[in-house]
Image: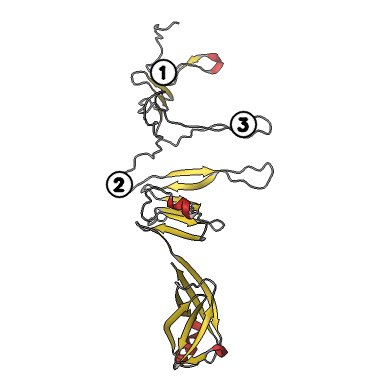
């Protein structure tokens, strides 16, 4: 048998292999070569891609576990093509991940799974889903139920969201920042955002306090009491919200909604002197 010769029992597209007992065999419904289009089909005789899998069941492409003693697994790298060597200002090829075609109200998603570290030892750590990109472009990290109203949905009970941390000089060196761009200013310890013309910060702090019954003073016909809090600045806007449990005391004292704040304190007013303690929540907004 030589190149250009004819195998009379072979089917077009078949790739020959050694079967049982070394007998020359073919199975082009499982292993098919489309020579006209230079495509290889696995369980399909009509490959539409350079490498196509039959679509009647799920398929997996992977690297097997290492069979040597006490060895880590090996990497699998997928990369797109590079520009021609010596070419001027040419892009690299894009790497495209995409789902299959859906119909009607159906959709698809891309899932990313990793194996997390556990206790030292030999126990297998099976990969599980860590990130998902939904059919409508939502990204979920730490959740498989991405909220439909969120473009980015982060979920964790042990970790938080950490924006880029930088000095004011580094922040100001950002070229043409977009409105809404957010950073953490490591000098002022504040999250800041760009409003289109300048960098600003909005800090909201919630804390509790108690208005002691014996700490009210009468001035200008109103009873008043100052609450101290280190988070209050001269530019703070402070909302004082009484607890529901103090409702009867508040009604009798006619606690006023008008509050004034200065550096380090907020002052609360009442028409009548409260006869018992009043628990409050302070909502402190700092610009």
Tell me what residue is drawn at x 37 percent, y 47 percent: 135
- Across and down, in percent, residue 259 comes to 44, 81
Report if the CB atoms under discs 2 and 3 are less than 8 Å apart. no
Q: Quadrant of the N terminus?
A: top left
Q: Which residue is mark 1?
A: 14
Q: Is residue 171 above or below residue 2?
A: below
Q: Residues within 10 Å of mark 3 (few under 14, many from 20)?
A: few
Tell me what residue is drawn at x 41 percent, y 38 percent: 97
Quick one: label 2 or label 3, which is nearer the N terminus? 3
Residue 268 in view, yes or no: yes
Q: Nearer the viewer, mark 2 or mark 3?
A: 3
Q: Which mark is residue 66?
A: 3
Considering every residue shown, the one lying at the far left of the view is 104
Q: Which mark is residue 104?
A: 2
Tell me what residue is drawn at x 37 percent, y 20 percent: 38
Quick one: label 1 or label 3, which is nearer the N terminus? 1
Taking the image as shown, residue 67 lies to the left or right of residue 20, namely: right
Q: CA distance from mark 1 to mark 2?
A: 37 Å
Q: Nearer the viewer, mark 1 or mark 3?
A: 3
Q: Nearer the viewer, mark 1 or mark 2?
A: 2
Q: Is residue 99 above or below residue 66?
A: below
Q: Quadrant of the C terminus?
A: bottom left
Tell me what residue is drawn at x 68 percent, y 31 percent: 69
Q: CA distance from mark 2 to mark 3?
A: 43 Å
> In front here: 79 or 1?
79
Taking the image as shown, residue 240 lies to the left or right of residue 197, namely: right
Q: CA distance from mark 1 to mark 3?
A: 32 Å
- Across and down, in percent, residue 210 comes to 55, 81
């Amino acid at each position: 048998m030589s190149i250009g010769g004819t195998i009379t029992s072979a089917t077009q597209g078949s790739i020959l292999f050694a079967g049982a007992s070394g007998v020359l065999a073919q199975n082009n419904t499982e292993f098919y070569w489309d020579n006209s289009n230079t495509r290889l089909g696995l369980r399909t005789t009509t490959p539409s891609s350079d490498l196509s899998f039959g679509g009647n069941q799920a398929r997996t492409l992977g690297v097997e576990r290492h069979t040597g003693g006490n060895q880590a697994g090996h990497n699998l790298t997928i990369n797109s093509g590079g520009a021609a060597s010596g070419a001027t200002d040419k892009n690299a090829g894009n790497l495209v991940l995409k789902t299959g075609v859906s119909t009607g109200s159906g959709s698809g998603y891309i899932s990313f799974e990793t194996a997390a570290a556990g206790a030292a030892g030999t126990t297998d750590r099976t990969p599980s889903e860590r990130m998902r990109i939904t059919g409508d472009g939502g990204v979920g990290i730490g959740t498989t139920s991405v909220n439909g109203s969120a473009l980015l949905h982060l979920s964790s009970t042990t970790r938080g969201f950490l924006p880029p941390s930088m000095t004011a000089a580094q922040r100001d060196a950002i070229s043409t920042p977009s409105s809404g761009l957010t950073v953490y200013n490591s000098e002022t310890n504040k999250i800041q955002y760009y409003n289109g013309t300048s960098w600003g910060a909005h800090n909201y702090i919630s804390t509790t306090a108690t208005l002691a019954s014996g700490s009210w003073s009468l001035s200008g016909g109103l009873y008043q009491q100052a609450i101290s809090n280190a988070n209050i600045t001269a530019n703070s806007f402070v909302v004082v919200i009484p607890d529901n449990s103090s409702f009867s005391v508040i009604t009798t004292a006619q606690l006023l909604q008008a509050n004034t704040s200065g550096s380090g304190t907020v002052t609360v007013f009442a028409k009548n002197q409260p006869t018992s303690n009043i628990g409050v929540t302070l909502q402190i907004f700092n610009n």
